[in-house]
């Protein structure tokens, strides 16, 4: 009937292990939405949207093109390499690296019924938003490219680097991704949030659960 709003399906099934992530109704996209924060990942088999905001962090979106299963991660910590600057010192205290984020995402998709031979991988983020530090974003991008090559996973699309943060929306059933560059005063806000996140990782390497973006 015209003029009748469609109520959000709050009873839609969430895969085991992801019940703690925040889910809410997005009126614009008319679907349930899950917000993925740094150090988190999410996998879904239903019509919903996974969203995040990326500065120097990187997200991989992996989609099983045959079974309509997909997931996204969000990591800020590549494997620690090179000199012990302020960045690598924080990395050394952290609990999760890019390798953990990729492995956990892939394993969760496989557990949900996905198959590696059907994977389509897209990567996003890695902007140079922490200008006073070593290029953390580029380290993340280099890491994830090496990881995909080593695992024999084909990269289908990438929007990485540059100096801008990104807003990312991923639809796990179709594999479609929407990306919007953030070129406003929010750049400074994101940079400040990432610095705060690094400090939290140094002081609390296990949790890092505070919503920053």
Image (cartoon, rainbow, N blue to C red):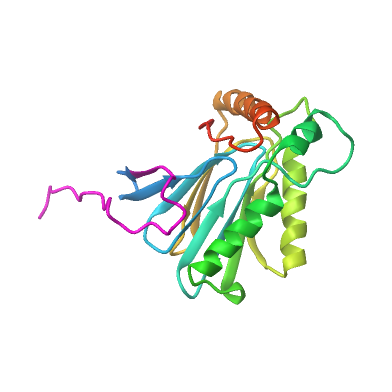
- The residue that appears at 72% across and 40% down in the rendered structure is 137
Horizontal arrangement in the rendering, residue 85 relative to residue 75 (left or right): right
Q: Position of residue 178 (x, y in %)?
A: 49, 50
Queried whether the magenta region covers residue 23, the answer comes back as yes
Q: Note whether residue 33 is visible.
A: yes
Residue at position x 63%, y 52% in the image: 101
When asked about the image quadrant of residue 132, the answer is: top right
Q: Is residue 187 above or below residue 162?
A: above
Look at 78% across and 28% down and name the residue there: 133
Q: Residue furthest left?
A: 1
Q: Is residue 154 above or below residue 190?
A: below
Viewer-closest of 155 and 184: 155
User: Is residue 180 within the magenta segment?
Assistant: no
Considering the whole magenta stretch, tell me its main secondary structure.
loop
Does any portion of residue 158 appear in the rendered image?
A: no
In the visual, does 22 lie left or right of 177? left
Total labels: the figure holds 0
Residue 1: x and y in percent read 10, 55
Q: Between residues 74 and 127, which one lies in front from this camera angle?
A: 74
Picture quarter containing residue 154? bottom right
Work out whether 71 lies above or below 79: below
The boundaries of the magenta stretch are: 1-24
**Residue 190 in the image, given as x and y percentages of width and height:** 59, 28
Whole-percent x, y for residue 198 in the image = 68, 30
Residue at image coords 65%, 59%: 103
């Amino acid at each position: 009937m015209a003029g009748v709003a469609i109520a959000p399906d709050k009873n839609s099934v969430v895969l085991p292990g992801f019940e703690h992530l925040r889910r809410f109704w997005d009126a614009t996209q008319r679907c349930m939405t899950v917000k993925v924060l740094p150090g988190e990942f999410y996998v879904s088999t239903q019509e919903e949207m996974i969203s995040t905001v990326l500065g120097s962090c990187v997200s991989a979106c992996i989609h099983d093109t045959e079974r309509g299963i997909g997931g996204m991660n969000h990591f800020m910590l590549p494997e620690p390499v090179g000199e012990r600057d302020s960045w690598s010192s924080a990395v050394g205290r952290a609990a999760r690296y890019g390798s953990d984020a990729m492995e956990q995402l892939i394993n969760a998709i496989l557990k949900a019924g996905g198959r590696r031979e059907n994977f389509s991988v897209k990567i996003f983020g890695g902007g140079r938003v922490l200008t006073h530090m070593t290029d953390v974003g580029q380290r993340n991008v280099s890491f994830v490219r090496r990881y995909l090559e080593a695992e024999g996973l084909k990269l289908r699309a990438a929007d990485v680097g540059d100096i801008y943060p990104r807003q990312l929306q991923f639809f796990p059933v179709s594999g479609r991704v929407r990306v919007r560059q953030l070129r406003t005063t929010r750049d400074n806000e994101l940079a400040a949030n990432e610095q705060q996140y690094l400090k939290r990782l140094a002081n609390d390497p296990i949790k890092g659960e505070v919503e920053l973006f």
